[in-house]
Image: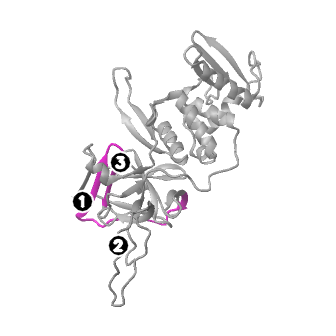
Amino acid sequence: MEEEPDILTEDGWRSVQAVSPGQVVLTLNHETGLAEWQPLLELQALPTGRHKVVRMRGRSHSSLTLLEHRWPVERFYRRTGTTRQKNPDGTWKSAGRASRTLQGRERVWATSETLTYWDRIPIAAPLANAPRTPTWSDALVELVGWFWTEGHIKPQSRSRLPSTGVAIYQSHRKNPEKVTRIRSALHQAFGPPVEAFPRGHRRDGAPRWREAINRQLSEFHLSVDAGRVLIELAPDRVPRMSFLRRLTKDQLDLFIDASLMGDGHGNEACVQLSQKNRAAAEAFQTAAVLAGYAASLRAKQPTRTTSTPMWTVTIRKQAYLCPRPAAQSGRGFIIAQELHEGALWCPRTPNGTWLARKDGHVYFTGAPPAPGG
């Protein structure tokens, strides 16, 4: 069964069939090239029947659209810079030979059927009107990154109440610089460390932390009041969408950097982070998207070294997909027309675009022309 695409809303990723008019979703202003939040106007469903569609699929893209489906693209051009003139009889005057000195890219609309070799589709964009004033300190933002990747919520003995005791672990032998960063962030967020938490004052409102050494590990234990601060921003170690949306661009980069230091790896072309919890991996993917990076999500099956399934988020440097060149490269990218009988849905927004995710791959796409338009 064909997987329906997801759409990024203010509350996180949702199936395109599960959104309703009025919900705020992420879109692309094709005039400025910036991402922006806009309300969903309507959700169009394609009438039942067999329809000609275009399937594009490769290692970093997956889409299934009508032939007339619109795409916001940046098209490469190379021009002479001369102005053509007409003869008195209406024919064009010969311009002679001129060097093509003007080149660049222009934002235009294309359809799935008319995409050219020179068109590239945006898969990432900086966020317009991103928060400029921090809601939380940089130290606390960094701690959330360490908490959801390297942290642990300690069980509360002899109590049915949810625990808010938190510990963050890191190897001081292998990663002394990471230990230093965690220690510094804790000091800035909650003050200097204490030797022990006072008895009988488990919830006195004063956040505290202490450091302990356990063989090769440095253990950073947070009091219930300090732990509660982190858990409110990332319950069950899943960063809230409301937290991510209120981060400044610099804080999003700080959060991503701390998260990658906790569980990431990569090279110059891309970086990756793997998690068992899909919701946590999706939150990290969302943070990357809001920061203006291209990010994909895929399932990773168990291996000899990892016995449980994982979800891997990949952040790439490129912000565009060039479908036609990719299809001609011989590297497995396909563009093909076929008949489709299943459901097809298309959200409509004021600027005519929306951020889609299909098979884990993210890209900005458009809506078909309005009837009669």
Whether residue 56 can be seen here: yes
Residue at image mark 3: 61
Q: What whole-number distance in Å separates the C-alpha atoms at marks 3 and 2?
A: 43 Å
User: Residue most toward the bottom?
Assistant: 89
Q: Which residue is drawn at 57% across and 13% down?
A: 173
Task: For mark 3, give the secondary structure.
Answer: strand
Residue at image mark 2: 96
User: Residue 15: where, in percent of width, then height?
Assistant: 42, 52
Give above or below for 359 relative to 120. above
Residue 234 included in the magenta stretch of the image: no
- Which of marks 3 and 1 precedes in the sequence? 3
Q: Which amino acid does label 2 sit on?
A: Gly
Q: Which of marks 3 and 2 is in front?
A: 2
Q: Which amino acid does label 3 sit on?
A: His
- Quick check: marks 1 and 2 in contact, CB under 8 Å? no
Residue at image mark 1: 341
